[in-house]
């Protein structure tokens, strides 16, 4: 299966077909694998003239064992006071990350967002995120840049220090709705302009007009929801920090 690991039988086929003089592309086609996969497999296991299925299998097992031994133990989940079960928090964080990815957020940005969101303080430094997510500082930097552009997090200086920390916006989803209303307004205006240019009586013009009517209704509903939420938050003494 493409994407899965090569099996012992796959390696037997590779060895036999190499002996027949077949190229990587043809071997890959027969196995349903990219030619690059076959090339890497052969290159790291003796090359075209020295490749052996059994030896390749054993080398793969040794590499797998070595990688498992070198992998550092996963650090405990911090911020799990208040009687929380660390395993339950960890599972929820993963499922929330997957949900953000399904909604279109890049995986690394989703991991950072979920990590910040389940933290009571809502704020972590780059070093904190590197330790918790076990990724490179560059990965954190790229993810935070994306989240800043989406107005989901902001930077602030750690009190009394030169370091920065990243702070999640408690009203992230409110800001997202407000941004949606603004974007919808631009779409309504453009659709109405398209209807005028193309002619409302034409199929293309009618299509734009229908789009404008629908999006305008959605925007009005969203705007009402935002206002109702703000009024409720104000009455409760909530809202943004």
Image (tube, rainbow, N blue to C red):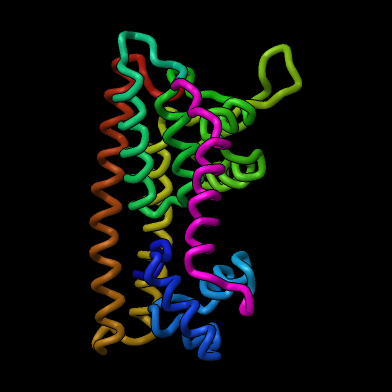
Q: Is residue 91 above or below residue 67?
A: above
Q: Residue furthest right?
A: 162
Question: Which residue corresponds to the image point at 32% horizontal and 22% vertical from the top-left?
Answer: 233
Question: Which residue corresponds to the image point at 35% horizontal and 64% vertical from the top-left?
Answer: 188
Question: How far from the left and from the top, in percent, is residue 19?
Answer: 53, 85
Q: Is residue 232 above or below residue 107?
A: above
Q: Quadrant of residue 4?
A: bottom left
Q: Quadrant of residue 21?
A: bottom right
Q: Nearer the viewer, residue 240 or 91?
A: 91
Q: Which quarter of the image is occupied by the N terminus?
A: bottom left
Q: Nearer the viewer, residue 89 or 61?
A: 61
Q: Nearer the viewer, residue 120 or 206?
A: 120
Give the residues drawn in magenta, as a range: 48-77
Question: Which residue corresponds to the image point at 25% horizontal and 54% vertical from the top-left?
Answer: 218
Can residue 140 be seen here? yes
Question: How far from the left and from the top, in percent, is residue 210?
Answer: 24, 72
Question: How far from the left and from the top, in percent, is residue 107?
Answer: 46, 49
Question: How far from the left and from the top, in percent, is residue 94?
Answer: 36, 37
Q: Nearer the viewer, residue 155 or 4?
A: 4
Question: Which residue corresponds to the image point at 67% horizontal and 26% vertical from the top-left?
Answer: 164
């Amino acid at each position: 299966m493409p994407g899965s690991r090569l099996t012992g039988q796959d390696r037997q086929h590779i060895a036999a077909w190499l002996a027949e003089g077949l190229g990587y592309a043809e071997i890959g086609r027969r196995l349903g694998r990219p030619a690059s996969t076959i090339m890497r497999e052969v290159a790291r296991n003796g090359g075209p003239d020295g490749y052996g299925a059994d030896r390749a299998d054993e080398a793969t097992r040794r590499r797998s064992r070595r990688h498992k031994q070198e992998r550092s133990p996963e650090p405990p989940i911090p911020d799990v006071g208040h009687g929380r079960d660390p395993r339950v928090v960890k599972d929820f964080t993963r499922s929330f990350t997957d949900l953000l990815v399904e909604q279109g957020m890049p995986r690394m940005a989703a991991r950072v967002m979920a990590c910040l969101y389940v933290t009571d303080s809502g704020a972590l430094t780059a070093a904190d995120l590197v330790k918790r997510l076990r990724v490179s500082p560059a990965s954190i930097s790229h993810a935070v840049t994306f989240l800043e552009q989406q107005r989901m997090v902001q930077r602030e200086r750690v009190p009394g220090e030169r370091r920065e920390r990243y702070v999640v916006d408690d009203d992230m989803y409110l800001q997202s709705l407000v941004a949606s209303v603004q974007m919808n307004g631009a779409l309504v205006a453009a659709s109405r302009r398209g209807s005028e240019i193309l002619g409302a009586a034409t199929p293309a013009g009618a299509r734009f007009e229908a789009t404008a009517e629908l999006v305008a209704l959605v925007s009005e509903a969203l705007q009402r929801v935002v206002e109702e939420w703000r009024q409720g938050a104000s009455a409760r003494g909530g809202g943004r920090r």
